[in-house]
Each structure stands twice: as C-alpha cells, then as structure tokens.
Amino acid sequence: MKITKNKRVFVAENLVIDSWEKIKPSFEDLVNRSIDTKENYKNWLVDKSELEAVLEEDAAWRYIKMTIDTRKEELSEAYTFFVTKIQPELAPFEDKLNKKMIDSAFFSEFNKDQDYQIYFRSVKTALELYREENIAIEAEINEKSQLFGSISAAQTIEHKGETLTMQKASSLLKETDENLRKEIFEKMSTRRSEDIDQLDKLYTDLIERRHQVAVNAGFANYRDYKFQELGRFDYTKEDCLNFHSAIKKQIVPIVKILQQEKLTKLGKDKFKPWDSEVDPDGKQPLKPFNTGKELLSGTINMFREIDAYFSDCLTTMDEMSYLDLDSKEGKAPGGYNYPLYEIGVPFIFMNAVGAQRDLVTMVHEGGHAVHSFLSRDLELTGFKSLPSEVAELASMSMELLTMNLWNEFYANEDDFKRAKKEQLESILKIMPWIAQIDEFQHWVYENPQHSVAERHAKWMLISKEYGTGLTDWTGYEEVQATAWQRQMHLFEVPFYYIEYAIAQLGALGVWKNSMTDFPKAIEDYKNALRLGYTKSIPEIYATAGIKFDFTEEYLKELADFVKNELQKL
C-alpha cells in the first residue's frame, strides 16, 4: 500500500512548531476570513481541518517519542512544551472558530447532511463547555497527567541479576513454581509501594483541578461535565450505573464458577494474590512468540487470511517504522494505537514480552490501525475523531475475529485451544474490573473532597461487590487497597474505560455473526469502520450488523453465548 501525505493547501509545508507565533497567523486567517458563498464555507472547513490535522499530528509525535523513552528529558520537555505553551493558546481561537462555524449563514445548508450533523453536534458541545478560566487549569491537568507514565515506567525489579520491567515481571506470575510467583509478586508489590503516596497525591491534585473545571463550566461535578465532553449523546450515567449492577448480577457469578473450578484443580481453598494467572493444570505459560518481529510477522499472516487489506495496513506501518512493540527499560507501560490524521497512518506502541496477552494486544491495536486506514480518506479531521464506543468496537472485534487463526503462533493443538479458552475467560473476568473502575470514578468525582483513606476504603468496599471472595489478601491488604493505581485511565483519560465493556458486547455480536456468514460479517465490519464518526453510535453498530445495547438482558444473552463457546473448548 503506497501512502503519500496530501499536499498542504493552507498550512506551510515547512512549518516547525517551536512557538505559538508560528501558528497564530493561520488561526487569525480563519477567524478573520470573509465567508460569502457556500463554496467559501466549505473551503474554510477544509482549511480548518488541515490545520487541526497538522497540530494533532505534531502533538502525537511528541507523545509517542516521550512514551518510547521516558528517560530522555528533552522528549518529555518537548511534549510538555506543547501542552503548556501551545494548547492553552489554541483554546480561545478554537472557541472563536466554533462560533464562526455555527453562526455562518451557510451552517444550516451543511447541517442537512448527516455527516456534518454529527460533527456539528460535537462543535456545539465544545462551545457550551468552553470557559476561558479553564484554559490554564486544563494545561496543568495535561502536564500533571503525564507524570503517571514516567512514575510507572520507572518501576522495575531485580531478579537473578536482571532488571525487569513490570510488564516482563508480571509474565512470571504465570509460572508453575509457586515460590517463584510469590517472590515476584512481593518484589513488584514492594516496588509499587514506594510510589503509593506519590500516586495518591497526583490523583488528588488531578481530582481537585478537574472538579474546578466542571464547576467553572456550571456543573455540579466533573462526572457530569465529562459525560458531556465525551459526547455521550446515546446513553446516560444512569445507563452506566445500571450496567454496573447487571455485571454484578450476571457476570460475577460466572467468574466465581470459573475461579472455583480453578481452585479445585489447584487443590486450594483460596487463591493467594500470586495465583490468579497460573494455569490450574500445571502447564507452563503460553509463549506464542519471542520477539516483536515474530509477533508482527504472525499477525500480518493472520490478517491476510481474514482480508488482504488488513495485512496491507500493518505491512505499510512496518515499512514506515510506525511500530514499537518490544518492552524495554524506560518505556512507558501499556499499549496504544495513535491515529495520525495528516499522514493517515497510525502508530502502534506496546510492551511485548512474548506472552499470550501480548498477542491479544497486538491484534487489538491492529484493529484500531485498520480503523484508521479505512477512515483516512474522510473529508474532515472531525469526521475521524472517534468516540471510544466505536473505536473499541474495531479493536475488540479483531481480537475475536483472529482467534481461530491463532494456530499461526501455536503448532500444538492443546496450546491453541488453551489460548482461545484464556481469551474467552478473560472477557468474562475483565468485565467486572472495567465496571469496578467506572463505578469508582463515579464516586471519586461525586465526592471530590474525599480523603485518601476514604478513597482506599471505597475501593475496598466495591472490590468486595465485584470480587468473588475467593482470594486471601491477608498480609497484602495495602496491595488490594491501591490496585486502582495501576489503571492508567484514571490518571490520563478519566471516564474512558466503560466503553471497553460496551464495545466488548458489540464485538461479541460481530464474532457471533462471523460464525454464520464470515465474509458478510467482515464486510459489515469494514463498512462500519469506514464511517468514522459520520453517523450516530447506534447507526454505526447497525452497519456492523449488531445492536448498540448494554442492558442486562443483552448482557445475559451474550454471556450465555460465551459460556457455550467455552464448553466447546
């Protein structure tokens, strides 16, 4: 696939963003430009879109480089410069441009087109939420939230003379030697305990600032503000609260049954905290690959089996060096696919250590990447800015659509089946965790004045509601009370997590359809991704051949489907 960046029409090709003064003239041009025809309005929208793409891609590369090596101060400083010196200057101009867009005499003509209706809806929300006094606070929030990555990236342990990242160390918790698992767990817990107070303080600072942003915008709390900012037009906070209850009722009991079966095999009455990942039959951890290069090659082969276009996407990214897959010291934790709107080719970042979880992460991020490619030719940058419920549908569906091809990594049939079984069980196990994180956030921002002790106590309380009661945390209570500190979303992207559970139900629907008519399911999936965000979420799901539904009834239907598929394995 040959990719060429579109020639810039409005922004200078040789622009280097090293000061606000370099880009200010472009904004002033858009603010002051006369729009007296429909064609002028369209050109104005396209120029604005080009400027947005240039700026977002510049910020993206600063973030990508910083997370690849958090030890290089110059990379962190480059990102900090953008969020503290550029973004605050953008905000007032973006507000002026949004007003100009909506106030134009030609707005109503474009608003007849549904593609623009969805985009304009988001613009109107931004106008409603904008407050000049929040600009400086948002800059502080952006600067502070990046500290989580650097704190987490610095967490390593020593084992047998080797320095291990937390990602690499956690893979040893799958080992069959219980003494080894306990040793690794305690080393990890000890290291993380050094940062408990620092992360608590960081989270308190973020909560305080976010609450102020909400109050300034006329909201009672940050939760209500964030729901509007996230553009949750198709469901409410009450729907989320009902979903929490449904997961406790429908999913937690299934997880308890699965855990009880595992305990019986282990010959234990209760798990210890280091037992949750070990294979109950005493088998060694699955190791589908050794290097990131092997992981990529196998994933490309699997994608080709599904659709040649999918493999072309990853091959193109590899040729352009838009992948950084292996775990290494100094690298921020986690994984992501970062869309780059100007070039239209995304970047995949992850921390592969050879584990089965890494294979899942790779195909997950690969699903996001395919989404970026399929929507890259949409007319405006705003059409490609996706709500998470849509973005995660793409990635989670890909996890399941590739599952029958995982024998690319597993020559042994038993390992192949075991990998699929782990995947389906993990879907059931992760749902309560996602809901727990989400419920925790609702409480945190409804009660912004809470103390650190109250925060830990609340976490422990809801942990019992979402837990199975089958793990003995005696002696490790602090580890349990601070487990939330490992969730990046709480620090960097608040309230962005429940979408994973919502999209997981959609992905199960896509997978279910693929069992009946695989070619049609793939074509429906591609057609949905091509839409970007030019239709409502329910319409995008319908295009994919599924329902946008996370009621208890639908949750139970899909949970029963997963249970049935597990029994086949």
Image (cartoon, rainbow, N blue to C red):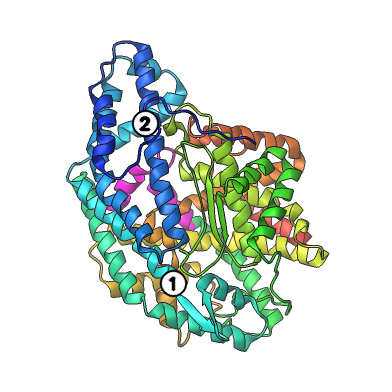
- As helix, strand or loop, the secondary structure at mark 1 comes to helix
Give me the residue at 39% from left, 18% from top. 110
The structure residue drawn at horizontal position 26% and vertical position 25%, both measured from the top left corner, is: 29
Q: Position of residue 28 (x, y in %)?
A: 24, 28
Location of residue 300 with respect to 196 vertically, above or below: above
238 vs 69: above or below: above
The stretch of residues the image draws in magenta is: 220-245
Q: Choose top left, top right, bottom left or bottom right for residue 92.
A: top left
Q: Position of residue 281 (x, y in %)?
A: 74, 77
Foreground residue among 475 and 73: 73
* Mark 2: amino acid: Ala
Q: Which mark is residue 483?
A: 1
Q: Quadrant of residue 463?
A: bottom left
The 10 Å Cα crowd at callout 2, few under 14, some 14 to 19, many 20 or more, is few
Left or right, 285 with reference to 91: right
Q: Nearer the viewer, residue 106 or 393?
A: 106
Note whether 536 is above or below 446 in the view shown.
above
Find disc 2 in the rendering and name its residue. 12
Tell me the residue at 46%/25% (across/down).
115
Q: Per the image, is 166 magenta?
A: no
Q: Is residue 234 magenta?
A: yes
The disc, 1 or 2, on the residue closer to the chain's N-terminal end is: 2
Judged from the image, the secondary structure of the residue bearing numbered disc 2 is loop
Instruction: Indicate the position of residue 519 as horizontal and vertical percent values.
Output: 74, 36
Q: Tell me if I can see residue 315 in this picture.
A: yes
Image quadrant in which the C terminus is located = bottom right
Q: Quadrant of the N terminus?
A: top right
